[in-house]
Amino acid sequence: MKAFCCYVLTIISITLCLFLFGCGNSDIHPPTLSFVSRLDRLVVQVPSLPPPSPDEPGKMDQGIARVDKLGGRTLDPNTLPVSFRQALDDYLICTFGSPATPSIGDHPIATRLGLTPNGLSLGSKLYRKHCLQCHNIAGDGRGPAGQFMIPFPRDFRQGQFKFISTLNGKPRRIDLHHVLDEGLKGTQMPSFSLLSEFDRDSLARYVIYLSIRGQVEFDTLIGIGTGKIIDSTQVSRFANDRLDTILLEWEQAEMNSLKSTSLQQPDDGLPGSPQHNDAVRRGHALFITPGESSCISCHVNYGRNSKLRFDIWGTVARPANIYEPVLKGGNRPEDVYHRIRWGIPPVGMPPHPHLSDRQIWDLVRFVLAVPYPSHLPQDIRNVVYPSP
Amino acid sequence: MNKILIHFYSIPLSLIYILSLLAFLSALVLLLLGQLVTSFRVGMADPIWPTEPWYLFINYRLDFGYFIEHMHRIIGFVVGGLVALLTIIIWYTEQRSIYRWTGFLGLIISFYGFGNFHRELISQRDLTPAETLIPFRSMGITVVGFCILYSITINSLTAGCRYSILRLIGISALLAIMIQGLLGGFRVFFNELFGTDLAIIHGIFAHVVLGILSFLVALTHPMLTNSLCTYSTRNQCSPLLVKVSIFCTISLYIQVIFGVLVRHDPIPLTQKLHFLTAFLVSFFLFWLLFIIYSSPSVRLFLDNRLLVVLIFLLICQLVLGVEAWMEKFGSYTLPELVPVTKWNATVRTLHSLIGSVILAKIVMITVWLYSIAHPFYSSQVQVKDQV
C-alpha cells in the first residue's frame, strides 16, 4: 500500500512538473493586445453652471453625461462616421504602436524628449505592473481598481495635468517625477519612492507617451465632430499636424525647465518669528484682495465654503480648503509656490504671472500657516479663526 | 489553602473554548473582508500605514473601496485584541508560578515591542517610504519577548506539563496574527517594490492563522475534553483515517496557496496548478468523508450533518470555481482589466471564503481524529477539572 502511494505521488509530481512550462511573464503585454478605440464621451466645453453634487465612486461616465444638461458640451464618438474612426484608428496604430511595442514613429522631437521605443517598452512593463489597475491601459482613468476611488484616477488623454510648473499647461518631466515620488496626499495615488529613479523616469516617459497619444486622438475626434475634417482621407494629416504641435508643447515645457533659474526660497525664519509673521500678514492681505482671479473669490472662507465646479475632464473639483493641513499637490513650500505661480489650469485655478516672487512666498507662508493657529500672528488668527 | 490555590489557578477550558471560537469567527469575518478587498481591488484604497485604531473611524470617506479596506483594518484590530486576550488567559494555565510570571513578562515585552514598532512608524508618517527608518530595535524587543515565551513553553512540553500544547498553540496564534498584521501593512508600505508579492504572502499566511485558530478551537472543544474519549474508541480510529485526514489538510492548503496565486498573479502556471490540485483535493476529501462515514465509532464524534454540509460545500466550491474562472479569464482582455462587477466579485469572494471554511473544518476534523487515535495527545487535554 505504501509503495503504491509512493508510485502514485511520484507520477503526480512528474505530471505536475511537465506543466511548469508556460510560466509566462505577467509584466509584458501580449503582442496581440492593442489600444481600444475611444468610446467614452469627450468633454468639449465645460459647463458654466456648477455641478449639483460631488462625484460618486464608480460613476465617472454618468457624471460626465450630465455636462450637457448643465450648459456644457460633450461629443459621443459613437456618433461619428465609421470611416473617419477607422482612419484615425489606423493612424494611431501606425504611429503609436501597441502597449507591447509603443513608439511615436521616427519623430525627432520624440527622440529628443527621450520617448524612444526601448525606453517606452520598459515604461510599458512598469506601467502594467504599477499603474494599469487604476489608470487603465490607455491612461483613461477607468481601470478596474479605479472605479471605486474618489477622486477618480487621472485621465491622461487630454494632455492636461494639474500639478505643473510651466505656463503652457504641460508638465515638465520633473513634475511627473515629483508626483511619482511623493504620491498625492489625500488621494489613493501612492508614493513610488522605493522604485529606482530610472524606473520612475521610465514610468514618467510612458505617461507622457499615453498623454500624447490620447491628446492626438482627442483633438482629432473633436476635429471630426466639429466639421474641421471633412473627408476621411484628411484624418491622418490632421492627426499628424496635431502630433507635431503637441510634441512641440512638451518640448517647450522641458526647455523652460532648462532656462528657468532654481527656486530661491527666502529665509523668513521659523513660524512665530517677527519676519515670518510679517510675511503671513502680507500673504493674508493678498489672499483676501478682491478681484476676478483673487484667491478669496474661489477659496471662499479660506476654502471652507468653496463651491463645486467642473474640471476639463467633466468631473467635479472643489477649490482647496486651506484649513486642511494636507494639500494634494504637496505641502512643501515650493509645491505651494508652483500652484500659485502656474495655477492648476484643468480645474480653473489661474496662474499668477503678475505677482512677484516675494508676493508669492508671502502667500505660501500664509497658506501653510492657516492649518496651525499658533503659526498665525494674533491679529490674523482672530480673522481666520474668529471666536464664536 | 491548597485547594483554593489550585481552584484560583485553574482556568475552565470552556472559557478558552468560547474565546477561541470568538477569535476564529472574527478571523473568518476578517478573511471575508480581505477577500472582498482583493475582489474589488481596493488593497491600496488608503496608502497610509500604520495608523492608530481611531484614525480608521475619524478618516471616513464615502467611497466603497475605502470603506471595505478600512473595515478590514478595523476587524484586524479586533482579531488581534481577541487573540492577545486569549493568549493571556491561556498562559494563565501555566501552573509553575515562576514560569507563569516570567511568561507574562514575555507577553508584556512582546506587546510593548510590537506597539512601539507601530508608534515609531506612525511618527514618520509624513515621510516617503524611501525616507522612513524601519524601527528594528522595537522588532528585536518583540522577538525577545517571544523567545521567552517559546522557551518556557518548550520546557513545559518536555516536562509533560498540563495544557502545554495549548500554550504552544496560543502563543503561536499570537505570533501569527502579529506577522499577518505586519504583512498586510507592509503590502501597503512597500507597494511599489513588493506590493503584489506581499499581497500573495499575506493571503497565504491568512490561512496559516486560520488553521492555528481552528486548531485551538478543536483542541478546546467540549467534545474532545469530555469523557467520551474512551479506550475502545481509540482502538477503532484507524491510522489510515488519520493519514488521509492529514493528506487532505495538506492538499487543501496547497490548493489555497495556488488559489491565492491565481487571484494575485494569474499567469497560466498558477491557473494550471490550481485546476490540477482541485482534482487532488476532491479525491482526498471524498475519500476521507467515505472512511469517516464507514466508521460508526468515529461518527459518534462527527455528526452526519457535518459530513453532508462538507459535501455540499465542496460541490458549491467546484461550481463557484468554474464560474469564477469564467468571469476572470473568459473575457477577451487581460485578467486585470476585467471590470469588477457585483456579480463577479461575489462569485470570487464566495469561492475564496468557502475554500477557507472547508480548510478550517478539515483542520478541526484532523485534530479530533488525531487526538482519538493517539493517547499521548489526548492525555494533555482529557479531563476538565482534575486537581
Image (cartoon, helix red, strand yellow):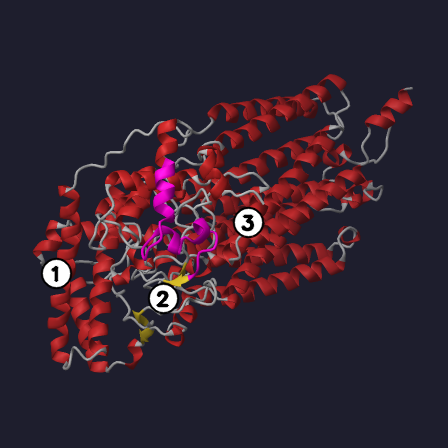
- Camera-nearest label, 2 or 3: 2
- Camera-nearest label, 3 or 1: 3
Chain letter of disc 2 in the image: A
Q: Do tag 2 and tag 3 residues touch (Cβ < 8 Å)?
A: no
**A189 vs B305: above or below:** above
Q: Earlier in the sequence, mark 1 or mark 2?
A: 1
**A15 vs B115: above or below:** below
**A385 vs B277: above or below:** above
- The residue that mark 3 highlights is B70
Q: Position of residue B162 (x, y in %)?
A: 76, 28
Q: Which amino acid does label 3 sit on?
A: His
Name the residue: 39% across, 36% down.
Answer: B129
Query: Can I make out residue B312 in this image?
Result: yes
Q: Is A56 left or right of A45, judged from the image as shown?
A: right
- The magenta-colored residue range is A280-308
Chain letter of disc 1 in the image: A
Q: How far apart are marks 1 and 2 (CA)?
A: 31 Å
Q: Distance between the residues labelled 3 and 1?
A: 46 Å
Looking at the image, which is closer to me, B216 or A39?
A: A39
Query: Can I make out residue A100 in this image?
Result: no
